[in-house]
Image: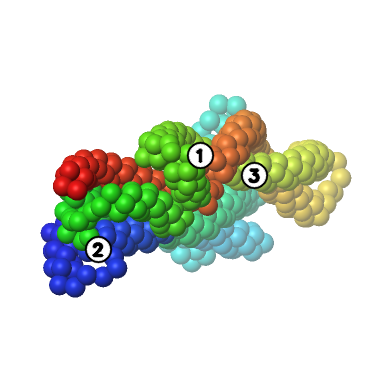
């Protein structure tokens, strides 16, 4: 309600009052209506204040909740970012490992392919050589058998053979006698020539050539048998070489196949881990996107909330200011009415014809009116101080009238003292309000800062504790792995020692056996090679023994070769295992050292942060305790400051109006008194 409307209502009431007088004058009615309107505006202000306080409390609660959500969202974002960085690092390591394994697999496959090609060529060469030597042996055996049979005869062919001066002539004679085919004779001749060329070095030591023989049957057969022995030696050597090559190839193939198999297995595991890391990274990226979006929305919501709450505060401030302006306008109107209409109302509503006796009763009436005004003011504002003032004014009126004192001065003094008291209380209350606002603001700011610091420290302690626990678990796992590796190393050492000792023992026995067989062969061959035996030597049985000894020598040599190859393979694998074990042990030991050191650092940080948290918590408790005391002193009152201020302003305005009423009555009394005295004098003269 604005000032124009209020004045219009007052004028309307004045117009109606002029038409018919009642017990209360229109001016009094207007003043009463203005007072009622002031009370109504004050009540509306109280309701608005209550509504705003509730809204402000909701703003604070909502802001606190959003702050917690923003803090949690930031922590989630940091956690997702850390997870993504970790997964990216893991993915890089796995991709490098997969690339390395792929390269190793390709290298091993290429080596296996090359070894297979070489092995196939060696096998083909051996097959051709074996076939050729087998055919040669077959021809030699047939030629030896034919010669042996022909030597037992005494025909013309026998005479031609005995007269032949060389093996070539003997073979030609055998071809002419249809004992051999020309193709077989050609191959045997080529073999003899080849053998003769390879034995040129033996001629220097006086050894006879393979193609030269004495002109008797034993010479031809001996030559053929020598060729047979050399062919068998070449075949045996070729077969031994083939077996060794095949065995070496099989071991190499097994080694490369196992390496490829294990590499493929490791690659499969690495690819699986890579897929898991990529999935974990994708999940973390999705979580980061959602968390970032929620965090952005929470920040925007908090900003919007702040704007809305500030806007509501501004609107409340504007409405409070407008309500204050309306109260000021009503108070001004009431003051103007009471200051300017006193005389006119007195003259218009019963004070035009006043006698000296009526003047006295009018003075008493104004005093009573002042008492009633103060009592009404005390009742409206529910003020015990004003009620006591009204009682004191009433007593002053009664006692002062009886004693003949200046009642107006007494009443004005009492009202003036009360005004001074109220103004002093208002000033003290305002100072306390400013002090409370300042201290409460500083305490709340410090509380928010300490609460934020406490939450930050608690979060950091929780993160460091979790990281330390995780590191300790990893250290325990690594220590268990190191213990297992140490146990496995001890077992491998024992097994290697046992294998090596067995190899030394078995290889020594094999070497001893080979040496014995070779010595026996040498003795037997030297004996049966002599042609001056003094008795009938058992050459057939000796040849059988020599053959068996050669088989044993071959078997012993093969066994020693296989044994040596197995020992070398086992030693190589053991050395590779030892090197790998040393590398892994060193890496895991360093990892344990670093992780233990890092966990100790985290524990130390947690201890220091816990001390800081205790200090911050103590400070926060002290601030909260001080804040509670401030609230008890500044907030926990039956009547809020705004209500006390409004009530005190209303009391001051009412008391000032009471003083104005008294001042107006005193002036009116002085004027009326002078007028009455002049009239009295006139009537006395006329009498």
Task: Name the residue nearer the viewer: 66 or 641.
Answer: 641
Residue 680: x and y, percent? Answer: 22, 45
Q: Which residue is drawn at 17% across and 59% down?
A: 348
Horizontal side of 580 relative to 522 (left or right) equals: left
Q: Residue at x 67, y 61 (%)?
A: 152
Residue located farthest toward the bottom when viewing the structure as drawn = 20
Residue located farthest toward the right when viewing the structure as drawn = 535
Q: How far apart are marks 3 and 1 (CA)?
A: 32 Å
Colour scheme in use: rainbow
Looking at marks 3 and 1 on the same chain, the residue that comes earlier in the sequence is marked by 1
Crowding at label 3, few (<14), some or many (≥20) Cα neighbours within 10 Å? some
Q: Which of marks 3 and 1 is in front?
A: 1
Rendered-image quadrant of the N terminus = bottom left
Element at badge 1? Answer: helix
Task: Name the residue nearer the viewer: 383 or 402.
Answer: 402
Q: Can residue 622 be seen in this view?
A: yes
Labelled pair 1, 2 in contact (Cβ < 8 Å):
no
Residue tagged by mark 3? 469
Residue located farthest toward the top when viewing the structure as drawn = 204
Q: Is residue 324 above or below residue 610?
A: below
Residue 212: x and y, percent? Answer: 55, 41
Element at badge 3? Answer: helix
Residue tagged by mark 2? 25
Element at badge 2? Answer: loop
Task: Name the residue nearer the viewer: 305 or 598.
Answer: 305
Q: Which residue is drawn at 77% across and 43% down?
A: 487
Residue 551: x and y, percent? Answer: 73, 53
Residue tagged by mark 1? 447
Horizontal side of 206 relative to 46 (left or right) equals: right
């Amino acid at each position: 309600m604005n000032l124009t409307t209020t004045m219009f209502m007052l004028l309307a009431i004045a117009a109606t009052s002029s038409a018919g007088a009642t017990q209360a004058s229109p001016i009094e009615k207007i003043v009463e209506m203005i007072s009622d309107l002031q009370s109504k505006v004050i009540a509306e202000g109280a309701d608005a204040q209550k509504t705003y306080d509730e809204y402000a409390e909701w703003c604070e609660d909502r802001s606190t909740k959003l702050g917690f959500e923003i803090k949690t969202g930031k922590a989630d974002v940091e956690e997702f970012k850390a997870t993504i960085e970790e997964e990216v690092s893991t993915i890089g390591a796995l991709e490098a490992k997969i690339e390395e394994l792929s390269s190793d697999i390709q290298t091993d496959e290429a080596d296996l392919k090359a070894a297979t090609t070489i092995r196939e060529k060696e096998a083909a060469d051996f097959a051709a050589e074996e076939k050729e030597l087998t055919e040669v042996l077959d021809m030699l055996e047939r030629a030896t058998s034919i010669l042996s049979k022909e030597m037992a005869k005494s025909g013309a062919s026998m005479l031609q053979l005995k007269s032949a001066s060389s093996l070539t002539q003997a073979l030609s004679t055998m071809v002419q006698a249809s004992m051999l085919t020309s193709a077989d004779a050609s191959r045997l001749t080529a073999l003899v020539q080849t053998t003769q060329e390879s034995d040129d070095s033996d001629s220097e030591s006086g050894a006879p050539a393979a193609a030269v023989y004495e002109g008797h049957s034993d010479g031809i057969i001996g030559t053929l048998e020598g060729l047979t022995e050399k062919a068998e030696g070449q075949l045996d050597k070729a077969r031994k070489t083939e077996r060794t090559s095949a065995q070496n190839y099989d071991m190499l193939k097994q080694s490369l196949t196992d390496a490829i198999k294990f590499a493929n297995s490791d690659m499969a595991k690495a690819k699986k881990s890579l897929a898991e890391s990529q999935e974990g990274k994708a999940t973390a990226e999705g979580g980061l996107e959602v968390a970032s979006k929620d965090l952005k929305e929470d920040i925007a919501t908090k900003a919007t909330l702040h704007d809305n709450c500030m806007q509501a505060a501004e609107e409340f401030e504007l409405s409070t200011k407008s309500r204050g302006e309306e109260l000021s306008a009503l108070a001004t109107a009431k003051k103007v009415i009471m200051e300017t209409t006193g005389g006119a109302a007195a003259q218009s509503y019963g004070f035009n014809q006043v006698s000296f006796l009526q003047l006295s009763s009018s003075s008493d009436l104004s005093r009573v009116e002042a008492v009633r005004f103060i009592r009404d003011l005390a009742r409206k504002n529910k003020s015990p101080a004003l009620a006591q003032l009204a009682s004191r004014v009433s007593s002053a009126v009664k006692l002062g009238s009886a004693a003949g004192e200046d009642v107006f001065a007494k009443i004005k003094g009492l009202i003036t003292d009360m005004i001074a008291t109220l103004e002093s209380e208002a000033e003290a209350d305002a100072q306390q309000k400013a002090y409370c606002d300042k201290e409460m603001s500083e305490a709340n700011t410090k509380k928010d800062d300490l609460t934020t610091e406490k939450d930050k420290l608690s979060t950091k302690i929780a993160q460091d504790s979790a990281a330390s626990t995780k590191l300790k678990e990893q250290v325990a796992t690594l220590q268990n792995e190191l213990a297992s590796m140490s146990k496995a190393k001890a077992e491998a050492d024992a097994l290697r020692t046992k294998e090596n000792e067995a190899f030394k023992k078995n290889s020594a026995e094999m070497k001893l056996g080979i040496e014995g067989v070779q010595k026996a062969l040498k003795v037997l061959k030297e004996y049966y090679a002599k042609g001056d035996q003094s008795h009938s030597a058992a050459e057939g049985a000796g040849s059988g023994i020599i053959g068996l000894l050669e088989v044993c020598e071959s078997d012993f040599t093969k066994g020693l070769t296989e044994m040596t190859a197995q020992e070398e393979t086992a030693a190589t694998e053991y050395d590779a295992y030892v090197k790998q074990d040393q590398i892994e042990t060193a890496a895991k030991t360093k990892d344990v050292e670093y992780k233990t050191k890092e966990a100790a650092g985290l524990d130390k940080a947690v201890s220091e942060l816990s001390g800081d948290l205790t200090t911050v918590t103590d400070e926060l408790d002290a601030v909260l305790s001080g804040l509670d005391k401030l609230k008890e002193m500044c907030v926990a009152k039956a009547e809020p400051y705004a209500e006390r201020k409004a009530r005190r302003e209303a009391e001051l305005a009412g008391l000032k109006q009471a003083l104005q009423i008294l001042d107006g009555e005193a002036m009116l009394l002085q004027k009326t008194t002078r007028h009455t005295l002049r009239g009295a004098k006139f009537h006395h003269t006329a009498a």
